[in-house]
Amino acid sequence: MVAGGRVDEGVACLRDGFLRWRQTGSKSLGPFRLARVADGLLLAGEAVEAAAVLVEASAIAEETGEHWSDPELHRLSGIAKLRQSGETAGIKQAEHLPSSGDNQRAQERPKFD
């Protein structure tokens, strides 16, 4: 929703979903789920809230040993820090890095026979 321009509605859904998920006590796929929440918050211009969500995601990764989404957490944390500092040049570069959900890296890998 946020990426589609429905920012207020999208952020409200992100916050509601985040709270509901947290109430379940589940930590399964937590870092990945929270990375998606943070990504939406960043798109909505909520860098401070996104940074807090990313800190929680990193803590869950440490607690559960679920580190496969660490690269995405680091990418989003960098964007959040840049946005909070008012830096704009680095943001454009970081936003164009492939996310963990992108298939681009797999397509760019050399093929071995």
Image (cartoon, helix red, strand yellow):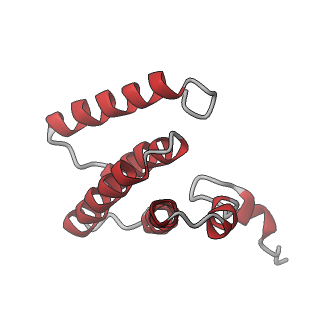
- Residue 76 sits above or below residue 20 on the image: below
Q: Could you tell me residue 66's position as x and y percent?
A: 32, 63
Q: Which residue occupies the foreground of this view, 8 or 73?
A: 8
Left or right of residue 57: residue 5: right
* Image quadrant assignment for residue 100: bottom right
Q: Residue at x 20, y 39 (%)?
A: 22
Q: Could you tell me residue 33's position as x and y percent?
A: 38, 46
**Which quarter of the rendering shows the C terminus?**
bottom right
- Residue 66 sits above or below residue 15 on the image: below
Left or right of residue 96: residue 52: left
Q: Which residue occupies the foreground of this view, 102 or 7?
A: 7
* Image quadrant assignment for residue 11: top left
Left or right of residue 32: residue 92: right
Q: Residue at x 55, y 43 (%)?
A: 43
Q: Residue at x 36, y 57 (%)?
A: 51
Q: Residue at x 42, y 48 (%)?
A: 38
Q: Could you tell me residue 105's position as x and y percent?
A: 71, 65
Q: Residue furthest front?
A: 86
Q: Could you tell me residue 32's position as x and y percent?
A: 41, 52
**Which quarter of the rendering shows the N terminus?**
top right
- Residue 10 sits above or below residue 95 on the image: above
